Structure formats: C-alpha cells, structure tokens
C-alpha cells in the first residue's frame, strides 16, 4: 500500500466529514433576504444589521468583499471572530485580527444562534448577518 492509501484523517468537527473523509457542508438553518420592496420582514435600513465574520472562512471573506465593494461599511457594522474555533465555535476576543463583540457582547457566535433558536444544535458558521431590531440571526 502507498502512503495515501494508508493515511486516515479525521475532522476536528466530525459532523463536517463524511465516512470517506470528504467535507460535508450542512444546510443553512437561518436564511432570509434583506429587500427594499417590503417583500420580506427584513427591510433595507442603514445601521440595522451587523455582520459577524471570521477571516479564516472563505464564505465570510466573500461577504466582507461585497460589503466593501458595495460601500456598505457605514451601513453594516462588522465584528471579526478569532480565526481559531473550538468545540464552542467562533469566539470573540481581543487577539490579533479579531475583536470583542460591541453589539451583543457575545463571547461566542453560538450565542447568536441560541438567541435566535434555543433548540438549535447544528454547526455554528460564518458569515452571520445579525438583525439588531429583531435580535435574530440571519445568514
């Protein structure tokens, strides 16, 4: 047997890995749209939303890029989580490249999920768009 055939790698978060070792992306638990036409419960409103990201996540990086390209920095606040996550998920602490949460004072992003749905037991992911009016997580 060759090296590649004998090597076995287990994910740090087993629910993210299939039996044969492939990454398994979970379905988003919280998803809705922000629209100016009034067709959703989330209207376009400057200062209403706050973006939680981790610079370690490519999906969050895309959200950061779009926020910048659209010139939304003054309309949508942003907090950067620690790039290293543990079993509790993404943490907010003062380490290089991260910051504390100035909006809700969450210690972990999982608290946003729990505030939105106390029974949620899935994986905590970024980016998260937080509605500061309804105090709900959107993704």
Image (cartoon, helix red, strand yellow):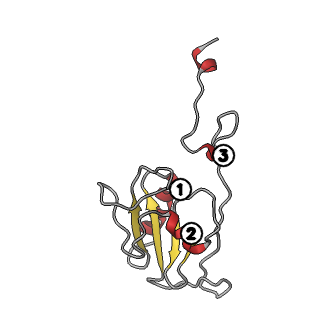
Measure the C-alpha gap from mark 3 to mark 1: 15 Å
Expressed as whole percent of the image width and height from the top left, the position of residue 83 reads: 41, 52
Q: Under tag 3, what secondary structure?
A: loop
* Residue position marked by numbered label 3 in the rendering: 24
Residue at the right extreme? Answer: 19
Image position of 81 with respect to 22: above or below: below
* Residue position marked by numbered label 2 in the rendering: 114
Earlier residue among tags 3 and 1: 3
Expressed as whole percent of the image width and height from the top left, the position of residue 125 reads: 55, 58
Q: Are marks 3 and 1 in contact (CB under 8 Å)?
A: no
User: Could you say which disc has been placed on residue 36 in the image?
Assistant: none
Q: Quadrant of the C terminus?
A: bottom right
Earlier residue among tags 1 and 2: 1
- Select label 3 or label 2 by which is in front: 2
Q: Quadrant of the N terminus?
A: top right
Camera-nearest residue between 33 and 23? 23
Left or right relative to 55: residue 5: right
User: Residue at left 44%, top 76%?
Assistant: 76
Expressed as whole percent of the image width and height from the top left, the position of residue 136 reads: 56, 77
Measure the C-alpha gap from mark 3 to mark 2: 23 Å
How packed mark 3 is, by other alpha carbons closer than 10 Å (few <14, some 14-19, many 20 or more), is few
Image position of 128 with respect to 3: above or below: below
Expressed as whole percent of the image width and height from the top left, the position of residue 106 reads: 43, 69
* Residue position marked by numbered label 1 in the rendering: 59
- Select label 3 or label 1 by which is in front: 3
């Amino acid at each position: 047997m060759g090296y590649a055939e004998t090597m076995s790698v287990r994910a740090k978060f087993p629910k993210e890995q299939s039996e044969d070792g492939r990454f398994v992306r979970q379905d988003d638990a919280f998803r809705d749209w922000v629209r100016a036409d009034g067709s959703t419960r989330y209207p376009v409103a400057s200062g209403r939303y706050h973006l939680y990201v981790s610079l370690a996540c490519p999906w969050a990086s895309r959200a950061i890029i779009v926020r910048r390209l659209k010139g939304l920095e003054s309309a949508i606040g942003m907090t950067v989580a620690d790039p290293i996550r543990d079993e509790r998920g993404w943490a907010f602490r003062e380490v290089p490249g991260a910051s504390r949460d100035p909006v809700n004072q969450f210690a972990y992003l999982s608290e946003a999920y729990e505030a939105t749905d106390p029974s949620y037991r899935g994986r905590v992911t970024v980016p998260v768009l937080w509605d500061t009016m309804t105090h709900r997580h959107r993704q």
